[in-house]
Image (spheres, rainbow, N blue to C red):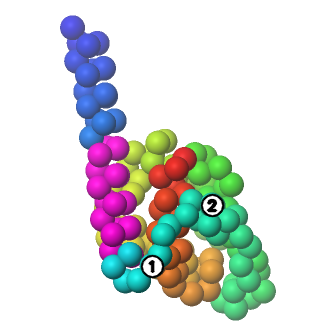
């Protein structure tokens, strides 16, 4: 009996976690569209994920999202400066990812400035979220 309760609990947690993720992403995407962003495209989000950027703050260093997060969003990353481990970006592997809109915006702000050298546009954010949702 205990085994069935554990299995039921895990299934419920998995389903609930995915529902929260879908709701948060949908709300963020709607907000980006309300600011004038067009249709979102997962391939543009993936291209940005892999694109190397040169930023003046990085003293000539070239960075990409993959510098810290790895090319595979299901893998654990590691911050290139601090060495701190970064949980996978993929919501299918890390069910706490993309469940809090304030945290999503906080990390977009920090990581876009650090990697791209500027804030990301609503279009870029939406493309990126669609990319994550597609994986």
Q: Quadrant of the N terminus?
A: top left
Q: Residue at x 22, y 18 (%)?
A: 5
Q: Residues within 10 Å of mark 1 (few under 14, many from 20)?
A: some
| Observer-nearest of 116 and 24 | 24
Answer whether labels 2 and 1 touch (C-beta < 8 Å).
no
Which residue is at a point 61% across and 46% down the rendered structure image?
A: 75
Residue 113 in view, yes or no? yes
Whether 85 is drawn above or below 123: the answer is: above
Location of residue 85 (image quadrant): bottom right
Q: Is residue 76 left or right of residue 4?
A: right
From this view, report whether residue 12 is shown above or below residue 99: above
Per the picture, the main secondary structure of the magenta-coloured stretch is: helix
Give the labeled residue for mark 2: 43
- Over which residues does the magenta segment extend? 17-32
Q: Name the foreground residue: 130 vs 13.
A: 130
Residue 135: image location, x then y, percent:
54, 47
Inspect the magenta stretch and tell me whether residue 116 lies in it: no
In this view, which residue lies farthest toward the bottom?
56
Number of marks: 2
Q: Residue at x 34, y 60 (%)?
A: 26
Tell which residue pokes out farthest to the top in this image.
1
Residue 62, horizontal then vertical, whole percent: 76, 77
Tell me which label, 2 or 1, sits earlier in the chain.
1
Query: What residue did someone put label 1 on?
Result: 37
| Dot 2 alpha-carbon crowd within 10 angstroms: few under 14, some 14 to 19, many 20 or more | some
Marks 2/1: CA distance? 16 Å
Q: Secondary structure at mark 2?
A: helix
Q: Is residue 24 magenta?
A: yes
Against 6, is 87 above or below? below
Image coordinates of residue 98 in percent, x first then y, are: 39, 57
Work out whether residue 83 can be spotted. Answer: no
């Amino acid at each position: 009996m205990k085994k069935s309760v554990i299995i039921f609990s895990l299934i419920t947690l998995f389903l609930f976690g995915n529902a929260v993720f879908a709701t948060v992403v949908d709300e963020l995407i709607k907000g980006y569209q309300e600011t004038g962003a067009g249709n979102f495209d997962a391939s543009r989000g993936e291209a940005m994920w892999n694109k190397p950027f040169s930023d003046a703050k990085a003293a000539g260093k070239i960075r990409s999202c993959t510098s810290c997060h790895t090319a595979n969003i299901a893998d654990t990353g590691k911050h290139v400066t601090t060495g701190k481990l970064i949980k996978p970006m993929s919501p299918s592997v890390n069910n706490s990812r993309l469940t809090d809109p304030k945290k999503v915006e906080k990390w977009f702000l920090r990581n876009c400035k650090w990697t791209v050298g500027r804030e990301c546009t609503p279009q870029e954010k939406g493309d990126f979220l669609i990319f994550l949702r597609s994986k």
